[in-house]
Image (cartoon, rainbow, N blue to C red):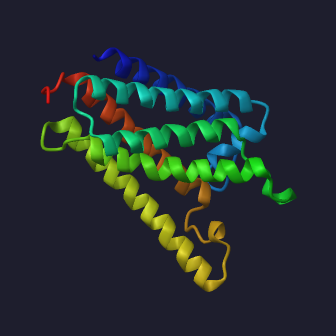
Amino acid sequence: MRVPAQAGLGAIAVAAAAILTLEFSSGLDLTRRTISEHQLGEHAWLFGISVALIALGSLGIGATLVAQRRARPPGLVALAGWSLGLLVVAAFPKHDWSVGPSFSGSVHRVGSVVAFVCLPVAVLLLARPWRDTMARVAAALGLGAVVWIAGIVLVGYTAARDGIPWWRAMPVGLGAVERGLVFTEIAALAALGIWAIARQGRRA
């Protein structure tokens, strides 16, 4: 039962390490440039593979929860939405919007939004915080991701009302905000995976 989640956590750890290496070796302005900017550089292939690994690792965690009969269908749908969104991000690279819109860039943006929204929903629906500490940690991080998303939406709404481009209205820069959200969501996913392999759970 635990093997898919163990493999999934391993894949996520490897992918996260690869992306962190890109983050600190690429010279990007981490406060202004989004993580997907790596798809415009020479190591775009590594970024794409890493994102795909996170998507597949997430499905491994879901498979263990299904085998343990601890997964509810709405939570699994949300987890699948997160994985699908990540696969779309990997397959359709970020576009340089300074040269105008593109189909790939638009699809990439939709995939990003779907992934960012679905992950906290999945964690909150799948984790059962009344069971044990790790489930509570996963749920807390899921709520943290919701707070990040709510803040981004609020800033975007305020910026639109005032006629300011939303990406310029971020107090600490769009890149910093996105990285805060991504860090919280990956941490929530890891906590969910640890919860999945820590206990066999009760059979329904």
Image quarter (top left, top right, bottom left or bottom right) of the C terminus: top left
At a point 36% along the width and 30% down the height, the residue shown is: 62
Residue at 72% across / 46% down in the picture? 94
Q: Judge whether 14 appears above or below 167 on screen.
A: above
Residue 29 seen anywhere in this rendered image of the structure: no
Instruction: Please give left or right for residue 161 compared with residue 141 in the image.
Output: right
Whether residue 147 sits left or right of residue 180 in the image: it is left
Question: Front-most of 52 and 154?
Answer: 52
Which quarter of the figure has residue 42?
top right
Q: Residue at x 68, y 33 (%)?
A: 25
* Residue 57 rendering spot, x and y as whole percentages: 46, 26
Q: Residue furthest right?
A: 99
Q: Which quadrant is the N terminus positioned in?
A: top left
- Residue 51 vertical position relative to residue 96 in the rendered view, above or below: above
* The one of 70 and 49 positioned closer to us in this rendering: 70
Q: Do we see residue 73 in this rendering?
A: yes
Q: Outermost residue toward the bottom?
A: 162
- Residue 124 position in % (x across, y down): 29, 48
Q: Judge whether 192 appears above or below 37 on screen.
A: above
Asked where in the image residue 75 lies, by quadrant, the reply is: top left
Give residue 82's position: percent from left, percent from top: 48, 42
Quarter-of-image position of residue 3: top left
Q: How many marks?
A: 0
Q: Position of residue 182 (x, y in %)?
A: 49, 46
Of 183 and 203, the residue lying toward us? 203
